[in-house]
């Protein structure tokens, strides 16, 4: 009893004389034990060498790509982005297009992978339509560049998943798209099998999907298969829900080049599209196409959603480097789209970007 009394008095003295220190330590311990922070952004294409180097940043320098926003990446356990193009040195294997009007080929110098690593990215999706722009040579060069910088990735048929551990949490990651050479977003049964296998051995499973029609006419989630330019782009609503049913914890969407709604389903968080985040050239960033969120998703150590926060960014057409948007345009847009597309989802999106989960008797 004496020992406990002395310990109690010591704690009370710490609270009285060092309250900030005490509660900072308590918060850190609680966070380390209970909460994971997953930061996610949408499409990243830091400039392309094709058809010529005029579409690259001056002096082939990508260092400004994240300079104005990387402070918002701090303290993330996971920093995710969709790598919308290959990391290559040669453009000789560039794809040939039947319709040049709708043909875009994205290839970044291999050294641009350093900018991803310097910003702190540790997971990249390779499941998208531009990862195959330079064929197998481009895919192989990209994988090698990411391996050399210890950045995990998934989504190609040659590397459908990845598993790694950080701070005592075991993560599984998988990625899907409707494109050749990628793990199919359209084969939901096969995708569920992938997710179940990861869920059996991991604490948190993150799945990303590059799907849906493109452009500002397609901001809504239609809850059906989307056809764009004659191509089946998948049913993102059915896919996301099916992945959570199979054991996925966080669903991260990209592909429409605009931001879409968010949803919470079975206590798991879904972002249906995170838009154009850092797209230096050859991608439209006018108006809503240039608004994008930095999502900070808080879950417990088993993937149950707690809360999330939107940091609003935008890309001016004359500079293309993402920066904080003081007008909060993407917060307003996500709130409107979510209220329209998922009125049954009991979440609140505040003016300052906080997303809270309105379930009675939850401790959050």
Image: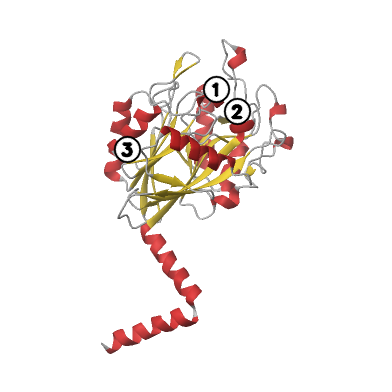
Q: Give the spatial CA distance, label 3 vs label 2.
A: 33 Å
Compared with residue 50, is residue 273 higher up or lower down, i.e. above or below?
below
Compared with residue 132, is residue 175 higher up or lower down, i.e. above or below?
below
Provide the residue designation for mark 3. 244
- Dot placed on the residue nearer the N-terminal end, 2 or 1: 2
Q: Position of residue 44 (x, y in %)?
A: 57, 35
> 186 or 156, which lies in front?
186
Residue at (49%, 74%) from the top-left corner? 21
Residue at (32%, 27%) from the top-left corner? 188
Provide the residue designation for mark 1. 133
Query: To which quarter of the image does residue 155 belong?
Result: top left
- Dot placed on the residue nearer the N-terminal end, 3 or 1: 1
**Number of residues whose C-alpha sits closer than 10 Å to that of mark 3, classed few (under 14), some (14–19) or many (20 or more):** many
Q: How many marks?
A: 3
Decide if residue 271 is on the left or right side of residue 278. left
**Number of residues whose C-alpha sits closer than 10 Å to that of mark 2, classed few (under 14), some (14–19) or many (20 or more):** many
Q: Position of residue 239 (x, y in %)?
A: 35, 29
- Numbered label attached to residue 61: none
Provide the residue designation for mark 2. 107
Q: Nearer the viewer, mark 3 or mark 2?
A: 3
Query: Can I make out residue 92 in this image?
Result: yes
Q: Position of residue 297 (x, y in %)?
A: 44, 48
Q: Secondary structure at mark 1?
A: loop
Compared with residue 269, is residue 226 higher up or lower down, i.e. above or below?
above
Furthest-bottom residue in view?
A: 2
Query: To which quarter of the image does residue 115 belong?
Result: top right
- Dot placed on the residue nearer the N-terminal end, 3 or 2: 2
Q: Are marks 2 and 1 in contact (CB under 8 Å)?
A: yes
Give the position of the N terminus as an image quadrant.
Answer: bottom left
Q: Are marks 3 and 2 in contact (CB under 8 Å)?
A: no
Query: To which quarter of the image does residue 100 belong?
Result: top right
Q: Give the spatial CA distance, label 3 vs label 1.
A: 31 Å
């Amino acid at each position: 009893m004496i020992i406990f009394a002395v310990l109690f008095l010591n704690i009370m003295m710490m609270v009285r004389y060092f309250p900030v220190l005490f509660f900072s330590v308590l918060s850190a311990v609680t966070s380390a034990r209970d909460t994971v922070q997953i930061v996610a952004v949408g499409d990243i294409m830091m400039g392309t060498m094709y058809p010529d180097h005029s579409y690259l940043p001056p002096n082939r320098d990508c260092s400004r790509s994240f300079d104005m926003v990387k402070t918002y990446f701090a303290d993330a356990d996971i920093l995710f982005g969709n790598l919308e193009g290959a990391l290559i040195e040669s453009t000789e294997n560039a794809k040939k297009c039947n319709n040049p009007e709708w043909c875009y080929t994205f290839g970044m110098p291999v050294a641009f992978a350093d900018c991803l690593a310097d910003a702190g990215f540790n997971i990249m999706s390779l499941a998208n339509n531009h990862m195959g722009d330079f064929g197998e040579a481009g895919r192989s060069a990209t994988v090698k560049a990411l391996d050399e910088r210890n950045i995990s990735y998934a989504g190609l048929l040659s590397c459908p998943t990845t598993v790694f551990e950080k701070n005592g949490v075991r993560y599984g990651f998988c990625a899907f798209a409707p494109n050749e050479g990628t793990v199919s977003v359209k084969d939901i049964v096969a995708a569920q099998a992938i997710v179940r296998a990861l869920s059996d051995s991991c604490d948190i499973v993150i799945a990303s999907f590059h799907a849906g029609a493109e452009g500002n006419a397609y901001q809504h989630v239609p809850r059906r298969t989307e056809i764009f330019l004659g191509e089946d782009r998948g049913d993102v609503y059915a896919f996301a829900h099916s992945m959570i049913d199979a054991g996925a914890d966080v669903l991260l969407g990209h592909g429409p080049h605009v931001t879409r709604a968010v949803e919470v389903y079975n206590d798991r968080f879904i972002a249906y599209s995170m838009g154009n985040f850092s797209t230096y050239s050859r991608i439209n960033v006018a108006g809503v196409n240039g608004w994008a969120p930095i999502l900070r998703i808080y879950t417990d150590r088993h993937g149950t959603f707690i809360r999330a926060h939107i940091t609003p960014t935008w890309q001016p057409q004359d500079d293309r480097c993402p920066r904080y948007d003081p007008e909060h345009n993407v917060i307003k847009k996500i709130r409107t789209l979510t209220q329209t597309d998922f009125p049954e989802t009991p979440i609140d999106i505040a003016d300052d970007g906080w997303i809270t989960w309105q379930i009675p008797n939850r401790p959050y």
